[in-house]
Image: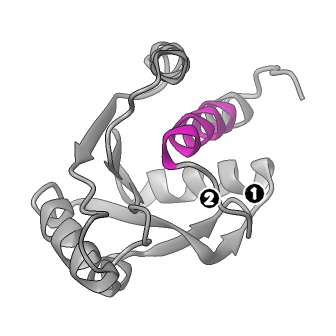
Amino acid sequence: MIKIITVGALKENYLKEALQEYEKRLKKYTDIKIIEVKDEGLLPPLQAMQKEAEKIKKHLTEKDYIITLEIEGKELTSEEFSEQIQKIMIVSSNITFIIGGSYGIDKSIKNLSKYHLSFSRLTFPHQLFRVMLLEQIYRSFKIINNESYHK
């Protein structure tokens, strides 16, 4: 199972449709669960991240292999990402990705993370990033299963 815990709600219909498309494609390979927690962006940054962390922790279990998405994390190619997914699936059947809010991810969540991942040093809108993450997870399963997928 792949679980994605994300701060903030998806509002734009075109992004919702893209998300639904990748969720549908991924059903062939794994169960996907997306959990949204409230964005506390109106609070001061540290307070907002702490409050978001409390909400995120409610959805974590001891079985989860936690991967945080962070600018400071390790950058991978799609092939390296698929290798990492494959390695993790050997030791854990629950992979949990965490996408932080507008201020990032609280230190308490980063400390629980077993892998700190970055897609880029660029900043992306959280709603768009969620679609990008699902696309890369889908691409990973295509690579793992030696199935063709456009480049």
- Which image quadrant for residue 112? bottom left
Contact (Cβ within 8 Å) of mark 2 with mark 1 = yes
**Residue at x 55% of width, y 19% of height:** 18
Mark identifier at residue 80: 1
Query: What is the three-letter code of the residue carrying label 1?
Result: Glu
The answer to whether residue 119 is above or below residue 51 is: above
Local secondary structure at mark 2:
helix
Is 1 contained in the magenta span? Answer: no
Query: What is the three-letter code of the residue carrying label 2?
Result: Gln
Mark identifier at residue 146: none
For the residue pair 135 and 106, the one nearer the viewer reads as 106
Question: Percent from the top left, x then y, of residue 140?
Answer: 66, 39
The answer to whether residue 40 is above or below residue 116 is: above
Question: Percent from the top left, x then y, of residue 103?
Answer: 42, 72
Judge left or right: residue 22 versus residue 44: right
Q: Is residue 98 visible from the viewing direction of this image?
A: yes
Report the magenta residues as a range. 126-140
Is 127 contained in the magenta span? Answer: yes
Task: Look at the magenta stretch and give its main secondary structure.
Answer: helix
Question: Percent from the top left, x then y, of residue 110?
Answer: 38, 80
**Residue at x 63% of width, y 53% of height:** 124
Disc 2 target residue = 84
